Each structure stands twice: as structure tokens, then as C-alpha cells.
Image (cartoon, rainbow, N blue to C red):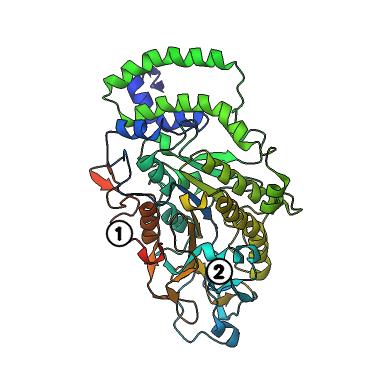
Amino acid sequence: MTNHSNSLSFVSRRHMLQTCSTGFGAAALVGLLAEAASAANSALPNGAALKKPHHAPKAKHVVFCFMSGGVSHVDSYDPKPRLQRDHGKPMPVKVERTMFNNNGNIMGSPFEFTPSGKSGIPVSSMFPHTAKVVDELAIVRSMTSPLNEHAQANFFMHTGFPTMGYPSAGAWAAYGLGTENRDLPGYVVLQSGHAVPPHGGVSLFSNGFLPGQHQGSILKADQREAIRNIRPRDPQAAQRRRLDFVRQFDQPFLEETAADAQVEAAIRNYETAFRMQSVVPELCDISGETQETHKLYGLDSDDTEKSAYARQCLLARRLIERGVRFIELSCLTKGIGAGGAANPWDQHGALKQGHGAMANQVDQPIAALIEDLRRRDLLKDTLIVWAGEFGRTPFSQGSDGRDHNPYGFSVWLAGGGVKGGTIYGATDELGYYAIENPCTIYDMWATVLHQLGVNHEALTYRYGGRDFRLTDVHGNVLKDILA
């Protein structure tokens, strides 16, 4: 209802549902989910929503470990001896403009690298636990991005576009393949402790123009209520009667709209929210996990940041067991080093302190997730993606920090049909530019979708007169890293 010039005008029910469908999803406890995958996808009128994969999948689930702020590749998975040898000398090549343009000389890594695993891949001393599972990793050393600023680069990493309004990779996966569990969302974003959304905010997890049930649902992993008001105040029988009553009006209206996807999404969200009241508290109750499991992940750590991230990793495993398609984990910080809450890996100064603290937070829990999934025979069905939005410069900012570097950096993938113990691509001897097999974020997501059984060029959605896709009009599957 609106009020203009002291007169009242009423909006129609159809207009209300169309314009507020995502709001209905939020009111329904952000339970953004379709029914079982086949039922959900067959009802969607637009694009290439899949009833089944395009080809036999190697993975069923994705865990996206997003290292917000930009991890330094030359301090983690891409050692450069020349940086140590020429530490303090001027850069011998042209230096591109950086974010703050306060550029110093060559800066050697404060971390040591050790050949690890049977593959002998060198891993930084920041990651002693991950080094033990390095034979499961395919490390891409030649990733690039066209963007050098956090918010734009975050959107690009999540959606393939540098601005808000486009679906996140998790939304595309849920839209294309649905979920194996009708009681949980297809796309879940886990937070804990002091974690906040990266620069760009919750729009990074958006469904964009896809139906509203595919938006990321944020679960607070260590809160009494992982989703606000998830614990029912009324008996479920009473809620069920109310939902059934509302359905008597909703179903005819849906038919009148010719099964409008956004209207259907709003209706589905009520049902999902109702079912989530039972399954979410049970999901987040880890009291039944063994003490050995708690210790493996680091839940018993005195470092509250590590234990909080460990809970996310353990819940990721539990979500995988329950059939959730796409899970994103969130780093957290109290402002370690020069990084902020939204970009904790962003050390423009005090890199050794800040990167060391962040690595301590995520190293053991992520390695434990890989090991736990392997023990339970779930790693083969789960693709883990570890990435920041860009890398960092081989030269210093100030005395002991590094600025943003999008011209060449490292990400890694594990499980889900990936060839472990693999290095793909290379940067130059300074770690500045990707010079061997340079690849893009489009290539990374094309590879992820391929492992899920999806042809990235065929997973489209028509919006505004154009067929959109996660990889825009780009992307090649990185076949050399696949088993």
C-alpha cells in the first residue's frame, strides 16, 4: 500500500509477490530452496535448468574456502628463490600501478618452503597441516583477474561480473542441479565468530535474476540459533495448518501467473522454512561428534579464531552428508595485522604477522576437512576450492607489506575428480605475471561445473533478452588438472 498526495492506492497481490519475492525468502528464515532437484528444476520455465547433468559428474558437492583479502601466492604455494636472493633491490621490470601505489623494492618471503608429500610440492611453513595432504591438491599457479580492488574482485570471483546483481556460483550450482535434501538449501554460506561478509556484502551470495530459492542461506555456525527465529514458537501442527490454509490461495494464484518462477520461489520458501526448523538445530548440534574429530579439526584450540573456523569446516562435512550442493566458508578476524574484518588476508603491512595468524586460523581445519572426507569416502564426491580474489606483489608496500597483484596468483582444488599432487601453470621468476598456461576465474568455474556434470556453456538463464551464464562468454575447462 502506498500513500501519494493524501490518497491511497493498493498494489496487486501479483505485483507484491513479484517485487518482494526475495523479501519473502528472508522472512521465511532465508530458507531459499526448491523441493527435490528434479521437481524444482522441471518447474522452472527459463534457461537450461537441468533435470539431470549434461554428462556423468565426478563431484556432487562443492566447498568454497574463500580467503577474503588476497593471499600472497609467493608466501604460500609459489616460492620464488629470486625474491630471497634480490631482497631489497629495485624491481627489474616495469611496475604496474597498485591499489595504493606506495611501492617499494623486492621483498623476500618471511616464510620457508618445504617439499611435501610424495609429489614433493613445496608448501609454505604457514600451512604445516595442509602440507600433509598436499597430494590431494591441484595447485593452479597462473590464475589471473582483471580487477585490483576488493569489492569488484570479490564480485568477479563469485559471479563472473564485477558488480552486484548477478548470481553467485553457488546459486548457479543450486539452480542447475538442485539439492539432494529437500529440507535444506542448495547453497549455504557458513559464518562463525567475528566473520562478516567480504567487501561487496551479502550480494556476493545473491541469486541475482535466478529464482529466489537459489540465494545463499547464511548459517551462523556457532550461534544458539544458526538462523534467526529458527526455533519454532508455535507447535508445528499449528504451523502446518496455517501453511495448508495459505496454500489454498497460493496454488490457484500460481496457476494464474503461468507458474511464474519468482512467485513459485516465494511460495516454496515458506515450506522450506517450516522444514528447516527441525533439521537446522540438529545439523548444528555437534555434541555427538567424537573427541577425536573435535581435536582433528581444532575445535579444542585456545585460538578462538581457529576453533570458530573449525566449526565451519565440520559443519561443511555435515552439510555434505546431508546432500547440500554448494557450501561457502567465511574467514574471520579481529583486525589482525593490516587486514580488516571484511578482508582479513589484506596485509598491506605486517605481512608476516597477519598472514601467519590467518594461516593458523584456516590451515588445520581445512586439512582436517580433507582428511575427514577422505576417511568417510566423501572426498571423491566433493570438490574443494581454495582461493582469494587476487594475489600480492613481489615487492613491498611500506617496509613489510604487499599490495594487490591480479596478474598472477595461486588457487587450489582438491577432491571431486581432481588430479592431486599437481601443479598447473607458472608465474615469472619474480612471481609477478602468469607466463605459463595463464588462466582466468572463468576457467576455474568452468572446471568446477564440469566436475559437477554441467557444460558451463549450456547452463544459462534468459534475463533482459539475453542468455546469461556464470562464465559469461568465456571459460575453458582445465583438463590438465583432472584425473
| Residue drawn at 38 percent across, 13 percent down | 248
**Residue 21 percent coordinates (x, y):** 40, 30
**Residue 173 percent coordinates (x, y):** 40, 45
Above or below, 14 relative to 86: above
Q: Relative to the observer, which residue lies in front, 129 or 468?
A: 129
Secondary element at image label 2: loop
Q: Amino acid at mark 2?
A: Ser
Q: Residue furthest left?
A: 465
Q: Relative to the observer, which residue lies in front, 206 or 285?
A: 285
Above or below, 93 relative to 305: below
Q: Amino acid at mark 1?
A: His
Neighbourhood count class around disc 1 (C-alpha, 10 Å): few under 14, some 14–19, many 20 upward: some
Q: Relative to the observer, which residue lies in front, 47 or 332?
A: 47
Q: Relative to the observer, which residue lies in front, 400 or 186?
A: 186
Q: Which residue is mark 2?
A: 72
Q: Which mark is residue 136?
A: none
**Residue 330 percent coordinates (x, y):** 57, 50
Q: Which mark is residue 474?
A: 1
Q: Is residue 342 visible?
A: no
**Residue 399 percent coordinates (x, y):** 64, 76
